[in-house]
Amino acid sequence: MREELKGLLITLMGVLFVVPDSLFIRLIDVPPLEISFWRGLSTGVLVLGFVLVSAGARSIGAALRGGPYAYVYLVAMSGTGILFTLAVSHTSVANVVFIIASMPVFAALLSFVWMGEAMSRRMMLTMVAVFLGLGVITYGSGETHGASLKGDLLAVCVSFVFAIALTAARRVRAVSMVPMLPLAYLISALCLWPFVQPVQLGSAQLYLVALHGAFIAISSIGLTLGPRYIPSAEVALLILLESVLAPVLVWFVLGEDPGGYALVGGAVVIGALALSNLVVLMRKRPTAP
């Protein structure tokens, strides 16, 4: 029980620190690719420091020797940060986080196609509900100020590419992919370097960029360490908090109204995923002797 409480608190910390991610992207007044560059560089350096202190340089070498799926994970994780920033820059925060919440559905589809895993009726019903909710969100993009179909499609790409990364990590369970995280962040920054002008960042923006990187680094560490101690369904439920709190925070700070379609569609997506994970938790709960 003590270990489970530890896992809950660490995972919750990871979730709460990722909530302002979209808000930082809104507040940092530079082009989206430049935000992605600084997000990758600052977070990569901080997480790399944590990995070197906690696991040593050899852990990075071991991860790099994990085979082709390790590199699939690395490339996919490098792409998610860039795609996320672009998505938030082209549509409403509510649309982005509600669409990205569908990631477990894409992961289940990839596991079925890629790993030959059977798909339960529970997951099939969840998929139907989630895709229905996504349909409502994208339909409403033309009616909601600040939302667009282009941004919604980018958010779908984030969800799908992140699902690829998680599925690839499952194919190399014997090797920890944690040391790959800072490399993914740094590679994304390196790829963007030729297309940005980072030296032009002002002092006020530099403060926001540094704070943004620190928040994402703490979140990455928390969401990496916490799930070791609690069931995956419990982790998934906690992560859904970010989908609820992120648009509320942006609404409160910047007055960005998510719109009725996003709220209805998001409620369908989050409700379906929450119910699905609750069913898993109830089934795994030990029965009294």
Image: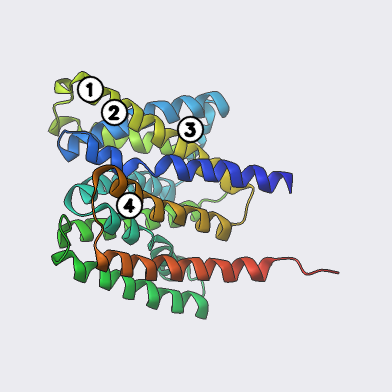
Given the image, on which type of amino acid does mark 1 rest?
Ala
Please say if 26 is above or below 44: below
Do tag 1 and tag 2 residues touch (Cβ < 8 Å)? yes
How many neighbours does mark 4 have within 10 angstroms: few (below 14), some (14-19), or many (20 or more)? Answer: many
Cα separation, mark 4 vs mark 1, equals 24 Å
Contact flag, marks 4 and 3 (Cβ < 8 Å)? no
Q: Earlier in the sequence, mark 4 or mark 3?
A: 3
Along the line of sight, which residue is nearer the eye, 112 or 135?
Answer: 135
For the residues bearing labels 4 and 1, Cβ distance under 8 angstroms:
no
Q: Secondary structure at mark 3?
A: helix
Sequence-first tag of 1 and 3: 3
Residue 256 horizontal/vertical position (percent): 23, 51
**Residue lying at 22% horizontally and 34% vertically, measured from the top left:** 28
Q: Disc 3 residue type?
A: Ile
Residue shown at the point (86%, 69%) measured from the top left:
289
Write down the residue under mark 4.
Answer: 247
> Where is residue 29 shown, x and y percent of the image?
17, 33
Q: Tag 1, which secondary structure?
A: helix
User: Which residue matches tag 3?
Assistant: 60
Which of label 4 and label 3 is nearer to you?
4
Cα distance between the residues tagged 4 and 3: 35 Å
Residue named by callout 1: 204
Q: Is residue 59 left or right of residue 70?
A: right
Relative to residue 45, is residue 73 depicted above or below? below
| Amino acid marked by disc 2 | Leu
* Disc 2, SS: helix
In terms of sequence position, does the residue under pointer 4 or pointer 1 come before the other? 1
In the rendered structure, which disc, 3 or 2, sits on the residue that comes first in sequence? 3
Q: How many marks?
A: 4
Q: Amino acid at mark 4?
A: Pro
